Amino acid sequence: MKKLQKELLFIILLGLFLNTPKIFSQNNNEVLTYNWFDKNLGIESLNFNNGSGHLNFDRTINDHHRYYNTNEFKNGNITYEGQNYYNIDLQYDIFNDQLIVRPYTESYYIQINLIKEKVDSFKIDNEKFVNLKDIPASFKSGYYEEVIVGNSNIALYIKHSKAQEKVIKDYSVFVDYKPHFDYLLLKDNKLTLINNKTEIVKLYPDQKRKINDFFLMNKDLKKTNQVLFMKNLIKYINNF
């Protein structure tokens, strides 16, 4: 089956190469081709349809769900077993660190947990997440939001997670979720946990004053949007 898929894909790519106007970029052609290939050959052509079904019976309060940003599916891209898929309905369960897909041709209610070991990366809400599989045991493995700092070899990795709490209200049991974030910085080919100012200053001792000034000037942002605060801080320290 995979051999037939590759042959069909080669023919389609060749046709696009010969007939597509030059005004379209190579990246646009690639996206269009993969979209056509996935939709016309059906879900059976995709390699990720053998995951387990995703079920969620949470009774939540205050709209504090287990998912990244929203409990709705969002259009995104994924690299799975080295293969790119575009315009896929994705949802990220950050409580279980589980990426979920809703197949093109299946029922609206069918949701599949992707096999994490086979997921290389995905993009949702214009943010890129990578699967950090081979990292030191002292760090959590799994999906991290990746922020490349300018054109440097420095990258910020953000681990989104949520803690679950049971809440009793009107004689019923509900669940509530509280977000938590861990930050890893890749600098000089080494990953370091930077969850507080002290750890950041250790990495940038000559910029202690600059770091203190940033914390002082951005106290409100740190309270309302910790992730954006950290992204801006790392860019500021590295002059980007």
Image (cartoon, rainbow, N blue to C red):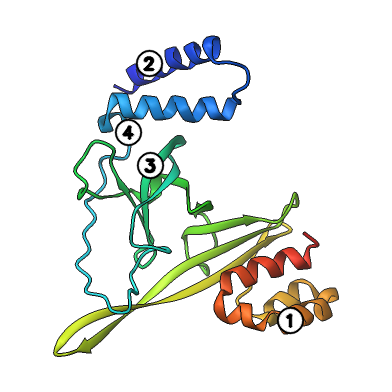
Mark 2 crowd level (few <14, some 14–19, many ≥20, 10 Å Cα): some
Of tags 1 and 2, the one toward the viewer is 1
Question: Do callouts 2 and 3 mark residues in contact (Cβ within 8 Å)?
Answer: no
Q: Mark 1 packing: few (<14 Cα in 10 Å), some, or many (20+)?
A: few
Q: Disc 2 on helix, strand or loop?
A: helix
**Mark 1 touching mark 3, by CB under 8 A?**
no
The residue depicted at 32 percent of the width and 33 percent of the height is: 46
Q: Could you tell which of marks 4 and 1 lies nearer the N-terminus? A: 4
**Residue at 26% from the left image edge and 75% from the top image edge:** 60
Mark 2 — residue?
A: 8
**What is the count of numbered marks?**
4
On screen, residue 96 above or below 167: above
- Residue 189 spot, x, y in % from top left: 69, 56
How far apart marks 1 and 3 lie (CA) works out to: 40 Å
Where, quadrant-wise, is the N terminus in this rendering?
top left
Q: Which of marks 1 and 2 is nearer the N terminus?
A: 2
- What percent of the width, then of the height, locates residue 57? 19, 67
Q: In this view, does 8 lie to the left or right of 212?
A: left
Residue 48 location, quadrant: top left
Lateral position of residue 114 relative to residue 78, left or right: left
Alpha carbon of mark 1 to alpha carbon of mark 2: how far? 57 Å
Q: Name the residue under label 4.
A: 46
Q: Which mark is residue 217?
A: 1
Mark 2 is on which residue type? Leu
The residue pinned by badge 3 equals: 88
From mark 3 to mark 4, how far is it between C-alphas? 11 Å
Q: Which is more N-terminal, label 4 or label 2?
A: 2
Q: In this view, does 45 lie above or below 232?
A: above
Q: Which tag is nearer the camera, tag 2 or tag 3?
A: 3
Q: Residue 197, percent across and down? A: 68, 80
Name the amino acid type tagged 1.
Answer: Met
